[in-house]
């Protein structure tokens, strides 16, 4: 089975990730029409934004049928964790239209920390030791904490908008935090809490495309989660990214493949879990050995904005391999250039932030690619800020330094009230390279 020679694509999502995916999709000679639900100011320049909520599967179905969509590509985790793949498979009208992403069971790798940890243990995939607790056994949770060393890692079992992981520095803080979590601090998401050992190393992410049988390893990336330079301050959705990660050497990546990627893909197949999509593996490199921190069942944002620009082969061909189980016949060509991206956010983010400010200068950027996220077009056709992470500026270069210089020079041309961005993206990697 294969896709028609040219296809109509529906892409679900609204962020910078979706702008980067839309750019690759619209560049493909195999793309006829591209629709993005709901998209943003950037995707509107590459295809047609449609006002459908990705979680409204009935509306998605209607659109897919009425516009002869040939493939649905899911950007964020929410529709996957809500079961969009199973929704399509269970409906005779649309069951032949492929949706790129895991089934409901596969999406649990992201939707339930306990499921992910149990899966890793079952298939001998290296990860931190852990136990799961509910409000019925808070005392045992406290006893388990006493057996661990500081700092303490507490994870709400369910999706908590990126806020569900708490790293407590003292035993006292960890005990009171786990009590609050189990008593509903993150609502239903923290009715169960996974407590795990702290992994001390350097973090990176590896991305994989799988058709359920085989896989292709996509570029590695490192993101910068905290709001402030030097990794200080509150957690965010991500303030920048670099790809590839220089310490992800061939030797290290071979360990990742043998110890993590292969057993993950094989494990999904053994469990009978349908998984045709991306796996985003958060890793800790501890003295050259990889350990899994978490799985996500989609591409990352802003990691996509540095991964996708490095993929030189056709993206529709890649999607076709994923959804029809023919990945092994596809070649994924990855550029050797570095790509970096620096996220510009609205004043106040990640707390309450400014909105509605006019954005100037995006069209003056020539050396970089600007991917939009929290933007909108007002009634006077002005581009305005409309979200916390407003836009991200991606550049390529032979070195990380070269690529960064371009992104920061491009950002100097972009103006909006209260613009904020980190000035130290990639600096830690440059320092490591010099060691
Ligand atoms: P997550 O929301 O699952 O991405 O976790 C947020 C962050 O917490 C990760 O990116 C890591 O920096 C950190 N983290 C999670 N688990 C561990 C662990 N076992 N040891 C050390 N850091 C961790
Ligand atoms: N940048 C982290 C994520 O997409 O979850």
Image (cartoon, rainbow, N blue to C red):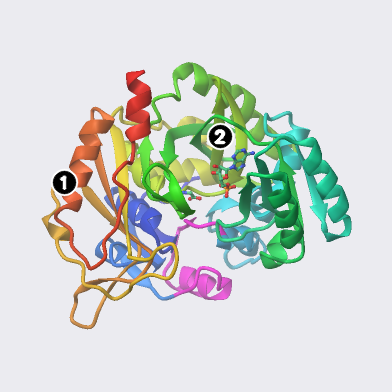
Callouts 1 and 2 close, C-beta under 8 Å: no
Horizontal relation, residue 270 to residue 310: left or right: right
Q: Which residue is mark 1?
A: 409
Q: Which residue is mark 2?
A: 283
Crowding at dot 2, Cα within 10 Å, few <14 / some 14-19 / many 20+, comes out as many
In magenta stretch: residue 178: no
Residue found at x 36% / y 56%: 16
Q: Position of residue 67 (x, y in %)?
A: 41, 70
Mark closest to the chain's N terminus, 1 or 2: 2
Residue 341 visible in rendering: yes
Residue 269 visible in rendering: no
Q: Which residues are magenta?
A: 52-77
Q: Position of residue 158 (x, y in %)?
A: 68, 57
Residue found at x 38% / y 73%: 50
**Residue farthest to the bottom?**
379
Of residue 300 and residue 61, the one placed in the foreground of this image is 300
């Amino acid at each position: 089975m294969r896709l028609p020679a040219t296809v109509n694509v529906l892409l679900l999502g609204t962020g910078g990730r979706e702008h980067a995916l839309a750019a690759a999709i619209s560049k493909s000679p195999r793309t006829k029409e591209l629709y993005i639900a709901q998209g943003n100011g950037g995707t509107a320049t590459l295809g047609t934004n449609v006002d459908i909520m990705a979680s409204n599967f009935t509306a998605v179905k209607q659109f897919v049928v009425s516009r002869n969509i040939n493939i649905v590509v899911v950007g964020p985790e929410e529709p996957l964790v809500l079961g969009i793949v199973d929704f399509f498979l269970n409906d005779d009208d649309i069951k032949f239209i492929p949706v790129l992403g895991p089934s409901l069971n596969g999406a649990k790798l992201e939707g339930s920390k306990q499921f992910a940890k149990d899966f890793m243990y079952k298939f001998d995939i290296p990860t931190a030791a852990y136990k799961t607790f509910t409000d019925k056994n808070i005392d045992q949770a406290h006893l388990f904490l006493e057996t661990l060393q500081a700092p303490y890692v507490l994870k709400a079992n369910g999706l908590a908008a990126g806020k569900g992981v708490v790293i407590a520095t003292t035993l006292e803080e960890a005990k009171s935090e786990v009590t609050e979590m189990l008593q509903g601090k993150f609502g239903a998401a923290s009715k169960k809490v996974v407590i795990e050992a702290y992994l001390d190393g350097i973090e990176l992410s590896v991305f994989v495309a799988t058709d359920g049988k085989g896989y292709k390893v996509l570029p590695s990336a490192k993101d910068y989660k905290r709001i402030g330079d030097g990794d200080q301050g509150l957690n965010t959705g991500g303030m920048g990214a670099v790809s590839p990660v220089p310490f992800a050497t061939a030797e290290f990546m071979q360990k990742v493949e043998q110890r993590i990627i292969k057993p993950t893909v094989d494990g999904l197949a053994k469990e009978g879990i349908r998984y045709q999509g991306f796996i985003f593996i958060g890793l800790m490199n501890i003295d050259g050995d990889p350990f899994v921190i978490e799985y996500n069942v989609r591409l990352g944002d802003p990691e996509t904005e540095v991964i996708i620009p490095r993929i030189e082969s056709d993206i529709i061909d890649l999607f076709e391999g994923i959804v029809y189980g023919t990945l092994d016949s596809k070649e994924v060509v990855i550029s050797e250039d570095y790509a970096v991206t620096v996220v510009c956010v609205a004043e106040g983010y990640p707390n309450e932030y400014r909105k509605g400010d006019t954005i100037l200068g995006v069209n003056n950027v020539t050396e970089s690619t600007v991917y939009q996220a929290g933007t909108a077009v007002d009634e006077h056709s002005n581009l305005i800020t409309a979200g916390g992470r407003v836009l991200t500026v991606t550049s390529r270069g032979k070195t990380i330094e070269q690529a960064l210089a371009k992104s920061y020079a491009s950002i100097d041309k972009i103006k909006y009230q209260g613009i904020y961005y980190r000035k130290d993206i990639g600096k830690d990697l440059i320092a490591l390279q010099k060691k």
